[in-house]
Amino acid sequence: NAGVTQTPKFQVLKTGQSMTLQCAQDMNHNSMYWYRQDPGMGLRLIYYSASEGTTDKGEVPNGYNVSRLNKREFSLRLESAAPSQTSVYFCASSSSGRSETQYFGPGTRLLVL
Amino acid sequence: QKEVEQDPGPLSVPEGAIVSLNCTYSNSAFQYFMWYRQYSRKGPELLMYTYSSGNKEDGRFTAQVDKSSKYISLFIRDSQPSDSATYLCAVRDDKIIFGKGTRLHILP
């Protein structure tokens, strides 16, 4: 039982490049989330998916897209990376709904030059 | 006013001391309160979960909620260097709202 897994662990991009961050959970959870964490800013919700087939914007969605591929997997795509997107990205999941306890993955550290 | 406020620290205390970490929140309707611990270069993990006012104890950790003053605390007894981490408080209504976290250093 791996919980929430994320790939890659670390990535360097040049401005304008695109990439997809992958997340998978094996806890049979319905809801999944993408956060970014920056010094002094705390965790900020980018997008979430309450259940398979649905996605909703969070606090800071601009510059990102998401896909809930199936119940297990939730990916985050940066179409044209910008230096302001340098951050640590965390995926999380919960059994159902945004009010339930969330379980986090280990994070992806992204540097955009 | 932010919904959850937390002093960012860092807070440095000697090994064995009692640590007190605190948060204030703005909405008196919040009923569920959580503490997450985040080690360096790791994701946050749930540490304590409490409902309404009162205390909850788990080993060396005690979570305390004072709803009258909208204040939540985490106490760590007999602190260890392995407790060095960032501690995030969180409150819950229709979603979970996280504080920004307090960095804690336990000095050997």
Image (tube, coloured by chain):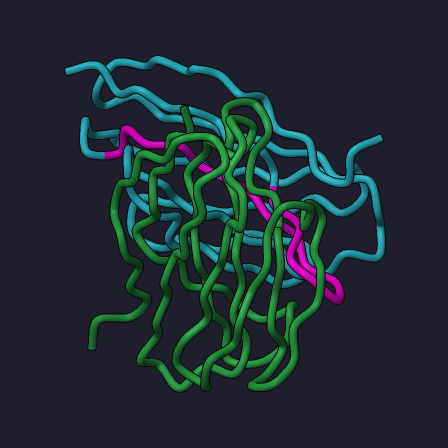
Q: Is residue A65 magenta?
A: no
| Spot occupied by residue B42 in the image (x, y as percentages of width and height) | 29, 43
- Dominant secondary structure of the residues highlighted in magenta in the image: strand
Of A71 and B105, nearer the camera is A71
In the depicted structure, whether residue B68 falls above or below residue B54: above
Q: Which chain is green?
A: A
In the depicted structure, whether residue B24 falls above or below residue B65: above
Q: In which image quadrant can residue A88 be found?
A: top left
Residue at point 41%, 57% (across, down): A20
Q: Which chain is cyan?
A: B
| Spot occupied by residue A68 in the image (x, y as percentages of width and height) | 52, 76
| A84 left or right, relative to B92 | left
Q: Is residue B94 magenta?
A: yes
Residue span colored magenta? B83-98
| A8 left or right, relative to B75 | left
| Spot occupied by residue A85 in the image (x, y as percentages of width and height) | 52, 34
| B68 left or right, relative to A20 | right
Q: How many marks?
A: 0
